[in-house]
Image (spheres, grey):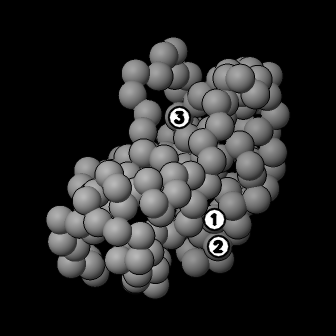
Amino acid sequence: MSVRLDELDRKILGELQEDASQSLDEIARKVGSSKTPVWNRVRKLREAGVIRRQTVLLDAEALGLEACFFVLIRTSEHEAGWQQKFLKTLQDRPEVLEAHRLAGDIDYILKVRVKNARAYDTFYQALISEVRIYNVTALLSMEEIKSTTLLPL
């Protein structure tokens, strides 16, 4: 269910997406409002679930996580018990940055960040030892062309 946003809400969200560490005074000045109305709107946007959380974006390569793999998973298992175990396994693996269930020939795609190919193999071996998977294909990203957390408003 989407939330109705007016132009001021969108401006506030745009500023928060760019830099959530800005003060309310800074945001208010940039969006043409004052601090109290901005604070009230931010609070309402949090309560409505539009703003889920605030965090910091880290540079993976600066932290030594130089390899990004996209892992395509096909499974012949579709029972609720298998799916619960699979989802828990993914939740427990910090290397898994994203996981999506797909329509089509591939059942799941994972975005996995690790130090190198050896670290990916360690991840892969752990994954297949925890859950039964029919087929796994790993694709190494050679270059990140675009990566953003900014949603189009």
- Answer whether residue 134 is visible to the viewer in this image: no
Q: CA distance from mark 1 to mark 3?
A: 17 Å
Q: Quadrant of residue 126?
A: top right
Dot 2: few (<14), some (14–19), or many (≥20) neighbours within 10 Å? few
The residue positioned 41% from the left and 70% from the top of the image is: 35
Left or right placement of residue 101 versus residue 120 in this view? left
Task: Report the residue at 63% width, 48% height from top.
Answer: 56
Q: Position of residue 52 (x, y in %)?
A: 50, 69
Q: In the image, residue 84 lies at what x, y percent?
A: 64, 73
Q: Which mark is residue 141?
A: none
Return the residue at label 3.
70
Residue at mark 1: 87
Q: Callout 2, which amino acid?
A: Gln
| Residue at image mark 2 | 84
Query: How busy is the neighbourhood of tag 1: few (under 14 within 10 Å), some, or many (20 plus)?
Result: few
Spatial CA distance of label 1 from label 2 is 5 Å
User: In the shown orientation, is residue 139 left or right of residue 129?
Assistant: left
Q: Residue 114 appears at what percent x and percent y?
A: 72, 31
Q: Which type of secondary structure does the marked residue at label 3 adopt?
A: strand
Q: Farthest left residue?
A: 7
Q: Is residue 16 left or right of residue 20?
A: left
Given the image, on which type of amino acid does mark 3 rest? Answer: Phe
